[in-house]
Amino acid sequence: MRLLYSCLLYLITPLVLLRLWWKGFDLPAYRCRWGERFGFVEAPSQPVEAWVHAVSVGESLAALPLIRALVARHGEGRVLVTTMTPTGSQRVSEALGPQVLHTYLPYDLPDVVARYIERMRPRRVVVMETELWPNLFRALARRRIPLLVANARLSPRSFRGYGRVRGFAGSVLSDCTEVAAQSDADAERFRQLGAPRVSTMGNIKFDLAVPEAQLALGERLRSALAGRPAWIAASTHEGEEEAALAAHRALRGQIPEAVLILVPRHPQRFDAVAKLVAKQGYGCIRRSAWNGEAITVEVLLGDSMGEMFAYFAAADVAFVGGSLVPVGGHNVLEPAALGLPVLFGPQMHNFIAARDLLLDEHAAEQVIDAGQLVDALARLLCDDVLRGTMGEAGRHAVAANRGALQKLLALLDRA
């Protein structure tokens, strides 16, 4: 099975490159740094103490507390961070800069991963969440380099998919030093797939640190809104902006001064969403064009990267996207940590534990469509007590579940 996997990967590599070129029409960064994807990187002057892989923006943000702790422990330039997407790469560069080494993850081809490992010489490797790479994992195991799958989650849907190749999945997981699962349910699914060493560590996303600079920016945005009720539609995908704008139109029928902070998930869609907002007749200002003046329009378009906490800090209620469309949801803990009531749609299979926690603590509500979203927004924006109660419940839920980071660091020490 591993041989078949490798052969197929070699065969489709030209198509993968063609896809990168095609995606470059929307985001030119996809056409850059292809050598890194084939393991052609400059070898550092000394071995990498820790290599952390986070596939894209969400995983990169989740990994930041761990990466910063490893940098504090080993020093600048001794921690390697890899991503697969330009947006994830940009987020790493913005947040960590020269503190870390950074490249794209090499493609999972035997000769490519061997070249990359020989050049980087990592002493230990951490892969975030559910990134399983058979050839990379086997290459690390053969070199006796400890490999930890951290913050690991496996949704029922993904479990069923891996279950079709259970033997192969088990052989890949057997190359891991340990799988540190987010929850007992995740841990059990990994065990059923054949992972021999699994523990429950909790979710590192609870250990998020909110940058003070972003809180300050959020306060400036809030001041510019001059007390207007504000809600945020965060990390939205195609189809969700239409729903958010429809909900906002209905909401303004009840609360005329309400303002929407609309933040698309992917930067290559910023211009298209701006055109959609204008087409629907809304007055809009883009974050990139805002110079501190009063915000009097109906929509603030968050067309910047790495400022999500600032947008949350400027809002009164948060809707988290990726949940009205079949994406699986995004991180609902971020707005909860700032004391915002959280709303999300029914498609939350990537964040089941976080969803259930906030619902159980009455810190969040699930909505089915734009109509229910309007009802929840109007109720929360008109009721200061309810909004404060839900927000405080979310803040407490996040604080009470911190601690996964220290467990992961201790596990790495033992590896």
Image: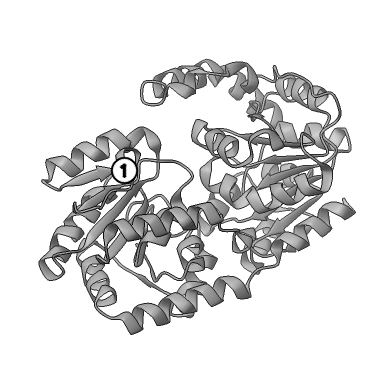
Colour theme: one colour
Disc tally is: 1
- In this rendering, position of residue 101 left or right of residue 93: right
The N terminus lies in quadrant: top right
Give, as a three-letter code, the residue at label 1. Trp
Task: Give the image location of residue 205, x and y in percent.
Answer: 59, 59
Quarter assignment of residue 374: bottom left
Task: Give the image location of residue 77, x and y in percent.
Answer: 77, 34
Task: Give the image location of residue 281, x and y in percent.
Answer: 10, 46
Q: Residue at x 34, y 67 (%)?
A: 316
Task: Give the image location of residue 97, x and y in percent.
Answer: 63, 35
Dot 1: within a 10 Å radius of its alpha carbon, few (fewer than 14), some, or many (20 or more) residues? Answer: some
- The residue that disc 1 covers is 290
Q: Is residue 48 visible?
A: yes
Residue 401 vertical position relative to residue 1 in the rendered view, above or below? below
- In this rendering, position of residue 165 left or right of residue 21: right
Instruction: Name the one closer to the observer, 39 or 193.
Output: 39
Instruction: Name the one closer to the observer, 15 or 32.
Output: 32
Q: Residue at x 17, y 56 (%)?
A: 246
Which type of secondary structure does the marked residue at label 1 adopt?
Answer: loop
Q: Residue at x 19, y 40 (%)?
A: 276
Q: Residue at x 19, y 54 (%)?
A: 298
